[in-house]
Image (cartoon, grey):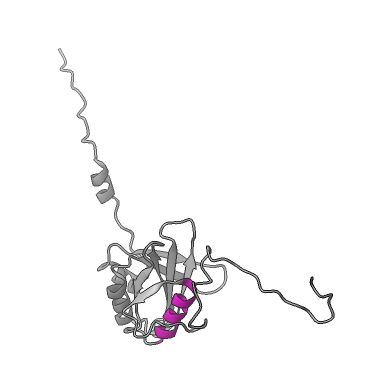
Amino acid sequence: MAEESTPQEEPQETDEAAEEAVARVLPDDRILAGLAEPFPNVVFTSFEPLAGPRQDTATVSREELISFVEAVNDAGFETFIDVCSVDHLNRKPRYDVVINLLSMQHTKRLLIKVGVPGDDPTVQSISSIYAGANFYEREVWDLMGIVFEGHPDLTRIVLPDEWEGHPLRKDYSVGSVPVQFKGSHKSS
């Protein structure tokens, strides 16, 4: 009589084991791959337009920003281009702070995105690493209200000192200013 064999059950992977089984894909660029290894929480994306150079983006947490920016600077991204911010009113985190850097020696650009929550709009200043960030951070604070901790002089740069609020926020009132054009009928 032939022995019946029961198929062996495969061990079921738990959610944690499944997450560990998925290997992190490192950027295909050797410089960015070198940056990705010591920063496992940084997410790298790349966009290849039909015309123009490739655009690489690194999404970083607020906690890792300074150490990541220092590593990026050491990797050859020596030129600071600008800092700006985006208000995504109904998203969490509400704001993105976007840092644009350039490497002349590697002829590459890198955008660094940092998500900033609306209830705590603070992020560390990078002006000690890139001195040129000083005025850009002041502008972002002035118009968007994101506080750059450790900034040497976070004061208004575009608006008057007595201005209240931050006019580039999507929930800021538009307001109105009456304008009288030459040759038009006077408003009553």
Above-or-below relation of 188 to 12: below
Placement of 88 over or under 72, stated as above or below: above
What is the quadrant of the C terminus in the image?
Answer: bottom right
Is 138 magenta? The answer is yes
- Number of numbered discs on residues: 0
Image coordinates for residue 169, horizontal then vertical, percent: 51, 67
In which quadrant of the rendered view does residue 147 lie? Answer: bottom left
Residue interval drawn in magenta? 132-144
Q: Position of residue 113 (x, y in %)?
A: 40, 68
Q: Nearer the viewer, residue 3 or 69?
A: 69
Q: Is residue 180 visible?
A: yes
Residue at x-position 16% and y-position 15%: 2
Q: Is residue 54 magenta-colored?
A: no
Residue 180 x/y as whole percent: 76, 78
- Residue closer to the observer: 61 or 140: 140
Q: Nearer the viewer, residue 37 or 144?
A: 144
Q: Image quadrant of residue 177?
A: bottom right
Q: For this view, does 40 lie left or right of residue 155?
A: left
Quarter in which the N terminus is drawn: top left
Q: Residue at x 40, y 83 (%)?
A: 133
Q: Nearer the viewer, residue 161 or 55?
A: 161
| Image coordinates for residue 131, horizontal then vertical, percent | 37, 87
- Which residue is most to the bottom? 131
Q: Is residue 54 visible?
A: no
Residue depicted at 46% across the width and 82% down the height: 156
Q: Residue at x 34, y 79 (%)?
A: 126
Residue lying at the far top of the rendered structure: 1
Q: Main secondary structure of the magenta part?
A: helix
List the single residue furthest toward the front. Answer: 188
